[in-house]
Image: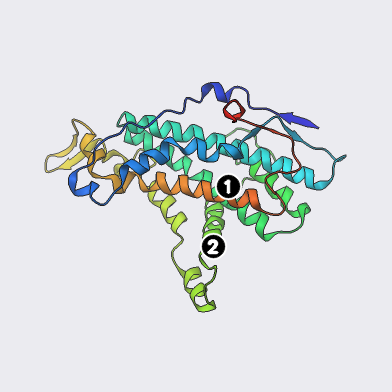
Amino acid sequence: MAKVSYNIAILMYKNIKIDRFELYEKVKKDIDSETEFKNIDDFKDSIKQYIFTDINLTDHTKPIEYAFQSRLQLLESETLLRGLMLKEGMVESLNNNNFPSYYAILKSFLEIPAVLGYITHLIYNKDKFEEIIPEINILHLGNREAGSFPTGSVKAKNVLTMFEKLDEVFKSLACADKTKEECMEIRKSENILTSTYADVCNYGHANFNANLSIGILTDDGWKARNSSKGYKEELWAFYMPGFSVGMNTIKIMCSLIGRNEKVQNFNLMGSQPYFKEERV
């Protein structure tokens, strides 16, 4: 068996708090920004129970249920740690009014709920561990060709495929207690999470949309803004929904994964909480 520990990341993670800022009057009357700020500051505390270290990756001497839980625990823990680091980068970018950086990080952050959504769909729709474990291994080890660099033989999942499964999970939740006809309408409706990701992708590269936060198009051509303060105070509906949707989706997927009958909050594992120094 192999043991996987996360010893360095906790020294790097600072849990930076978001600076409170005021929105324009015409904007803030429809937005509870203080609640959003608190959700951002509390994000780590809301997901830390799902992050483990000292994870034993079992070998063939253990039952397959152990292999499943150990690999899933590793994938979920490292995915959430990555999400925390990305969230920290977004907060620092917002604190410094650096929107091109913020959008680029937000694009990566939204891939965290996509991975978790794919996992959720997988474990609720497949019963055999022999079918589930290889899929987890692909999520963990899959890769793509990168120029002349060599790659392994395991091809990574396409991120849009993961968003497709994430939207299916949400539509299944929405169909609870609904009639057959209502469920058909829900299934035909827009894929909200995929659309959110697509929208953020429009700002996630160094392109025209991303640069609107640092410049404006006038009759005389492109002109740099003196400050992004106005953009920040007025255009909340452009830059913040993806952040909120991403955080809330991560929380929901973690809850669904933990209570799945195959997972049972990793009841077969003896791994330590990553943030164990804060345990009461």
Instruction: Identify the secondary structure beneath mark 1.
Output: helix
Q: Amino acid type of disc 2?
A: Leu
Between residue 214 and residue 177, name the one nearer to us.
177
Between residue 104 and residue 37, name the one nearer to us.
37
- State whether residue 154 appears in this view: no
Task: Return the residue at label 1.
Answer: 254
Residue 217 as seen in the image, left or right of residue 258: left
- State whether residue 184 appears in this view: yes
Task: Return the residue at label 2.
Answer: 173
**Rendering coords of residue 188 (x, y %):** 48, 70
Q: Residue at x 76, y 36 (%)?
A: 57
Q: Residue at x 29, y 43 (%)?
A: 208
Badge 2: few (under 14), some or many (20 or more) residues near its Cα, within 10 Å?
few
Specify the quadrant of the image occupied by residue 78: top right
Q: Amino acid type of disc 1?
A: Cys
**Rendering coords of residue 149 (x, y %):** 61, 32
Residue 88 as seen in the image, left or right of residue 165: left
